[in-house]
Image (tube, rainbow, N blue to C red):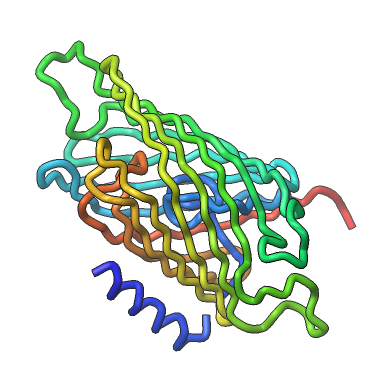
Amino acid sequence: MRLWLSLLLSAVLLAAGAASALAIPSVAGPTGIVNLPTANTAPANEVQFGVGYRSIEMYTDVDVSLWSFQVLKGVADDAELWVGYQRASNGEDTDVWEFGGKYLIGEDLFPRTGFLGGTKIAIGASMGRWTDAIGMYADDPLIPTDVETLRAYLVATKQIIPTYGGEWEWGEFPGTRIFGTAGLMYLRVSPGLGETDSLIEPFFGVEIMGTRNLTLALEYRLKDSDLEDDSVFSVLFRRPFGDSTIGEVGLTNASPIGLGQGKSDLFVRFGYRVPLVTGYR
C-alpha cells in the first residue's frame, strides 16, 4: 500500500508540474517533513503555525481522535524554537506536550565543488510529556500513567537535483528540485513506572518540489524491535494557497510520541505564517 500510494502521489505531482519553498512546522514540531526533521531552520522574521487532525487506531482496536497544534519561530539565522501540542481522545481526553529547538551547524563545511557541497547539517533536541497516556490506565490509581520523552538528533539535508549551487541568470531554477535528508535519531521513553526505554535509529527523507506550488515528500525511520510495531513511514502532499497559507494531506503510522505503529492513518493539516515587521520604511 505504501508503494502504490507513493507512486500515485508521484504521478499526480509530475502531472501537475509541482513546488514552493513555503513550509510550516512538521507534525512533530521542528522544521521537517511529517514526524522527522530536516536540517532547515525557520527564518527569524516570521512565526509559523500548524494545525491538523487524524483518527488513529492504537493498542487493541482503540480509535483515537488526534488534534495537533504547533508554533515555530526562528530565533536567529541558524536556529529555531518550537512548541507542539496534541489533544488525544477516545472518550477520555489526554494531552501531549513537547518543546524543543534546532541549531544549524553550517552549510559550508564541505567544498562547494564536491558531492557534499552545500549540505546543511543541524542538531536538535526536545522534551515532552503525554499526560494520562491512552491505553496505559491501571487498576491502581496511584500508578502514574504519564509518558515522558527526550529526543535528540543529528541531521543533514542537501539539494540533490539540480546539483548546480550558484545563481541562474533568470532567477530561481525553474524546474523540479529534489532534496534529500539523512540523520540519526535518539528517543528515550519513560512511562513513569521506574522504567526507561530508548532507541537510536537512522532516518531518511526525500522532498520533490516542482514549479506549480506542489510538493511530494516521504520519510522513513528504521524500526526498533523492542519499542515499535513497525518502522516509521510517512508520505505527504503539500500545496500553498497564496503567500501565507498552506495545506497538507498524507499518511503516517507514527504514534503521538513518534513511535512506529502497524497501521498508517490519513492526516490533514493547515498552516499559516505571520511575517514580523521590525521597523518602518
Residue extending furthest toward the top = 142
Nearer-the-camera pick, 153 or 65:
153
Nearer-the-camera pick, 191 or 54:
191
Q: Position of residue 216 (x, y in %)?
A: 46, 71
Q: Is residue 95 above or below residue 79?
A: above
The image quarter containing residue 172 is bottom right
The image quarter containing residue 226 is top left
Q: Position of residue 232 (x, y in %)?
A: 34, 51
- Picture residue at 26% right of the left edge, 17% below the top: 193
Left/right placement of residue 265 relative to residue 85 reads: left
**Quadrant that contains the N terminus:** bottom left
- Picture residue at 65% right of the left edge, 76% below the top: 162
The image quarter containing residue 115 is bottom right
Residue extending furthest toward the front = 114
Q: Position of residue 46 (x, y in %)?
A: 68, 51
- Picture residue at 41% right of the left edge, 65% below the top: 236
Q: Is residue 176 above or below residue 258?
A: below
Nearer-the-camera pick, 75 or 153:
153
Q: Is residue 135 above or below residue 176?
A: above
- Picture residue at 26% right of the left edge, 31% below the top: 133
Nearer-the-camera pick, 118 or 27:
118
Residue extending furthest toward the bottom = 15
Left/right placement of residue 20 relative to residue 64 reads: right
